[in-house]
Image (tube, coloured by chain):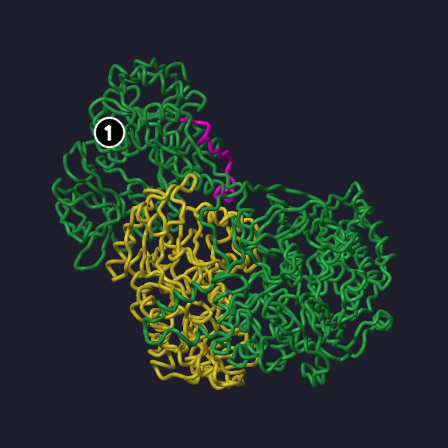
Chain colours: A yellow, B green
Amino acid sequence: MPFLLLKFGLNKDYPFEQIADLPGPTDLKSHYDVVIIGGGGHGVATAYYLAKYHGITNIAVLEKAYLGGGNTARNTAVIRSNYLTSAGVRFYTESVKLYERLSNEFDFNIMYSQRGQLTLAHTDATVRAFRQRAEVNKHFGGRTELIDRQAVGELVPSLNLDPTGAPILAGLWHLDGATARHDAVAWGYAKGATQRGVDLHQLTEVTGVDIEAGRVTGVQTNRGKVSCGCVVQAVSGLSADVSKMAGFPLPIVAYPLQAMVTQPVKPFLDPHVSSSALHCYVHQTSRGEIVIGGGSDPYPLYGTRSTLELKEGLIASAVEMFPFMSQMRLMRQWAGITDMTSDYSPIMGLSPVENYYLDAGWGTWGFKATPICGVTLAELVASGGKVPDLIAPFSLDRFDAFRQVNETGATAASH
Amino acid sequence: MTERLPLPYGSRIKRDALVSARFDGRELPALEGDTVASALVASGQWVISRSFKYHRPRGPLTMAGQDANTLVQTPAAPNRLADELPITDYPETTAQNISGTLMADRNAIIDWFGRFLPVGFYYRAFYKPFGVWHWWERMIRKAAGLGVANLSASPRYQDKQYLFCDVAVVGAGPAGLSAALKAAEGGASVLLIDEQSELGGSLTYHRFAIDSSAVRSEAETLIANVASHPRIKVLTHALCNGWFTDHYLPVIHGDRLFKVRAKSCVLATGSSEQHVVFRNNDLPGVVLCSALERLINHYAVGPQGGLVVLAGNDQAWMTALTAAEAGLSVAAVVDLRDAPDDAALLAEANARGMTVHIGATVYTARRSAESQSLSGVDIHRIDAQGEVGELIAQHDCAVLAMSAGFMPAYQLACQAGAKLDYDDDRAAFTLSGLPAGLLLAGSVNSTHSLDAVLADGRNAARAALRSMGMTTDVDESVTCAAQVNHPWPLFPHPKGREFVDFDEDLQIKDIVNATRLGYRDVQLVKRYSTVGMGPSQGRHAALPTARLVAKATVRTVSETGVTTARPPVKPEALGHIAGRRLHPHRHSAIADRHDAAGAQWMPAGLWGRPAFYGEPDDKPRHVAEEVTAVRTGVGVIDVSTLGGIELRGVDAAEFMNSFYTYGFLKQPVGRTRYAVVVSEQGVVIDDGVAARLAEDHYYVTATTGGVDRVYREMLRWNAQWRLSVDIANVTAAFSAINIAGPDSRAVLQALGCSIDLSADAFPYLGFRVGDVAGIPARLMRVGFVGELGYELHVPSLFAGALWDAVMEAGAQWHIKPFGVEAQRLLRLEKGHIIVGQDTDGMTHPGEVGLDWAMNRTKHDFVGRRSVDILAASAPIRQLVGFSLDLEAPKPLEGHLVIKEGDIVGNVTSCEISPTLNQIIGLAYAQPDDANPGDLIAIRTEGGVLVQARVEALPFYDPDNARQAL
């Protein structure tokens, strides 16, 4: 039994406050060197790496609700790097590497579960695309293979290899594919950041951005004004709205994305299984629940309501892949708001406002990038605006220059 | 024979219908009408399951399918609720999540180690040193999960049906019955939905008054009136499991999912009785008051061994009276308060000789080692909020019935956007902020006395009728003085095991410690401790959690709140939501001919297309023979899956000219033109052939997979342009075949054709309308495969006849049907791209040699701005033809083109050409390397780099002489 648990057990009233992961509420200071709008995974990761690697600690993370309560809490926690473009694969591969050691770095178990990701090909066009993705991944050191139908069956014996009208031809087997306890990632970063002096202000909503001569000077909040040296905007789902406060639009449309989870059962499914033709992916959490996710609702909406139609389609697909699951029981359905860009890649780096840095357009692929976003944004902020190579392809001006980073074919389900 | 209470108890059971059942391998005597749980309790067994974390024995809490304590395994599925499984349908069930037997679960040892497993322990251990987590994870995964999924279970037949009504009433208890009747009397069509097997809800088990006879007769009349009303449709055994926008309700009934659209909706969903939080409050035998009332009245089960009632309200005293009347021995009534609100209850209890403890609580429940269930309770005086004083009594008992209050069954209302606010005076959450047309009635609306509940139901009906303009009636006044919630039914014990959340085995200290660790927001408490995340989704845990978190963080309960309610209300089988899983499948009108000819099918969107003809084992030979037939004789291919779109109107040419990239205004009637569509981002998204039938009439083809998008885009643009043009997708109306090869003209002539087929009269790219073999046809001379060829489009009705005539007439030229595989190879030899294969989501026209098809003399076309910007910027890649000797490793589609260690492109098409006797392909390469004779490096299977020669396109017949014959 691990030592720490012995300590808890042998101490009748263990002083949990002394090992608290998160500090209680504090006053909002009138000035911070860095203000990070959005207390999700990306925001607190940025604060963490700024404090850890760059010695910058006079930082406020402003969160309008609770820590990690936006898409950090709502995503389905898939981590992978098997994208299609060089820019994408290089970036996400770095993220996976950081993830692998995060529990030990935090001294907080994020339950990083590397059980692989299997994407199914039902058409020969998909087989071609998968071969290309496998090759690009291998090129950048990822572990991805194109495997045949028989190997798919051996990997996931419970899978129906012949869904009606969409027999499985092959699979893209991504050994690096993983999941993690998504909340714990935000908590781990928040813990490390606040222990290094960062202020995390929950229930603190940014209501305005102060700009003088094209340069950001501060933000207004429901708790008062704060002046600052620079701002990082990391607000999944609301990026286009928040950027409007800073006076510029973003080429982002928000769509709701739903996911659902069954009651827990004993483990029967190791890898994450995904099918873009069936618009569905499925994995089993460490708790034993089956998480089912898929495509976005077909209309733009700033709402996290659940809809019946999407659930019907998604579950029909899940049952097509795993017919016996029709007897299992769905426990909960939820939704998040996804910031979709036209090329399914993020928007990171500089903005039209000086010292106002962007971390936006994270659509349905933001969780897996949390560590590398933190690292690169911290570098960007600490250098006073020198864009790191890794995120240079994701600049906002790529849309004007037709330099999109097209990952539309590499999402888990088409949106 | 099980001992049951005499009549009138047992409204659900048939006393003379014995059922032979087994639970966990042992005989279980039961009666028809029993659930698995009622049969178990009747047989004297309270233990049904083991808890999630500590593997403590658990028994039913609600007897209404509202808690996770009754989860059992059926042969087909895990995690079924024993208190709602009819024993006749599920005669064979077992316990789940155990090691050993239910009564002797080896994992119960975890309970002894519980002190070492504080809340969220798994965040604080198992990862040091790096790498050990992989091992721990396997252990933890095995320990987690409840039942075992039956991987060989086959889907049942489960279907769906729409239902419509004026008013949907959810819940057929007193409030729902009264609302349904009032709404129906007001002229509305009513759908009354209830999960239970009978109407009445709490009226079927709760007495509501000391003398219950008047209530019983009132209930009988109400139920009879509802059941006989012609405008009320009753659905019992029906679970309304969600509320979606505009009163769209999924209702599960048997193997059917009703999708109900209601104009308005009354939620009479009642409330969840709440437990008292004290040490060992999870012992089997500790139940909610309503559960005991259900056991007695529904199943005639009168548990022996003594009963203690723990009351936080007057309702619990009613339970004591009901139990005493049924002959149970009531050892004591313990009231958390200083006195019952209704003094008559105390008098009645005294009159019956019951022992009463006032201002006291059960502080600890004791367990019998033999039955693993409740054996007695220790009763302590309450000194202050949550604090107890001395032991004042001990009672032996087998049953403890408790009621600390009620939580509105808020799930449906909250899914509709309602808010829960805590009323400190009533110590209860109340709902507000419902959308229009959604009404609450009864205890979900915080009314509890029967008269108030009935009046509240009528008021909800009036409001629903008003919202539909069906009445101008004003509400009657409703007053409910009943105080049903005790403000603090939580009694921490130094040794713990006072459960707040039974599903997740969470005790008071777990919730408090989560806040001490910094997880102060109730959402964070939930996420850190997992409170409310189990199968019952917080029905019983939400209220005590809110109170504990509020106290620990010095906030009000309202500020603390509860976590979001999401669908479904109760766990639902995936099969219900999936339904019949209907799959559209399209096949061409000639499909049976292909089958007869030995076609091997491949999917193309929803379509099936012949890939080639012949035995699969001999595929390369068959494909090569089909290719040879086209190159040297004649072949025929079914191209019915190609999209067909008709455009008619005076502005048809203007529309074509604006939508497609090429010029169409001057296209002569009787000619075809290549038609490329680009997106507004300048990406090539589809191509086809446009034929002009008349000045105001075009017929244009699109790719099999692309036609739906092209058609949709056409409609979208025309909604903006408002041109005078009708656009129709006629893909299914027309079928098409392509006859290709040097002998194709001869075959067509032999068929009997009303058109002059000579090269001068009907040249390459010409278009004619005429009769072929007596069938009205549209003919195009197109050359996708690079030979003399004719594409015949005919009404689908005639397609089979045309195919037969072609095969018959072509027999003397040994005509061969060819499939998609041969066609791909033929077009590759000819250097034609396939949009979607040789293009990707970023391909712009210049990259694939389509710049010629961008007409820059016309005013505009969709995507023009982007195309021009892209054409003016430095090119990044170019699609090139390449060749390799046959001995070289053959690149596969998707392999990468590498230059100086970097990825510069990828192979999009690659085949062995039997005509040219070499490997040929298309690949993206750097523009510097795009000239014929340049070398590009392709990384093939196993990482082997091969140097391929860039070739001029087309590979075959570079002068295009053959297609123009």
Task: Please check the rendered image and state whether residue B719 is part of the magenta-colored stretch, yes or no.
Answer: yes
Please indicate, yes or no, whether residue B245 appears anywhere in the rendered image.
Answer: no
In this view, the residue in front, B249 or B257, is B257
Say which quarter of the image contains residue B769.
top left
Instruction: Please tell me how crowded label 1 is: few (under 14), some (14-19), or many (20+) other residues with Cα within 10 Å.
Output: many
Name the residue nearer the viewer: A327 or B182.
A327
Q: Is residue B126 above or below residue B258?
A: below
Q: Chain of mark 1?
A: B
Q: Secondary structure at mark 1?
A: helix
Nearest the viewer among A105 and A415 is A105
Is residue B638 shown in magenta? no
Answer left or right for B35 relative to B811: right
Q: Position of residue B965 (x, y in %)?
A: 23, 23
Residue B911 visible at all: yes
Q: How many marks?
A: 1
Q: Amino acid at mark 1?
A: His
Is B59 above or below relative to B920? below
Quarter-wise, where is residue B429 in the image?
Answer: bottom right
- Is A118 positioned to the left or the right of A259 in the image? left
Q: Give me the residue at 45% from left, 58% from top.
A: A340
Q: Is residue B526 above or below residue B881?
A: below
Residue on which disc 1 sits: B622
Report x, y in % for residue A406: 35, 55
Which of the 4 image quadrants contains residue B803?
Answer: top left
Q: Which residues are magenta?
A: B716-735
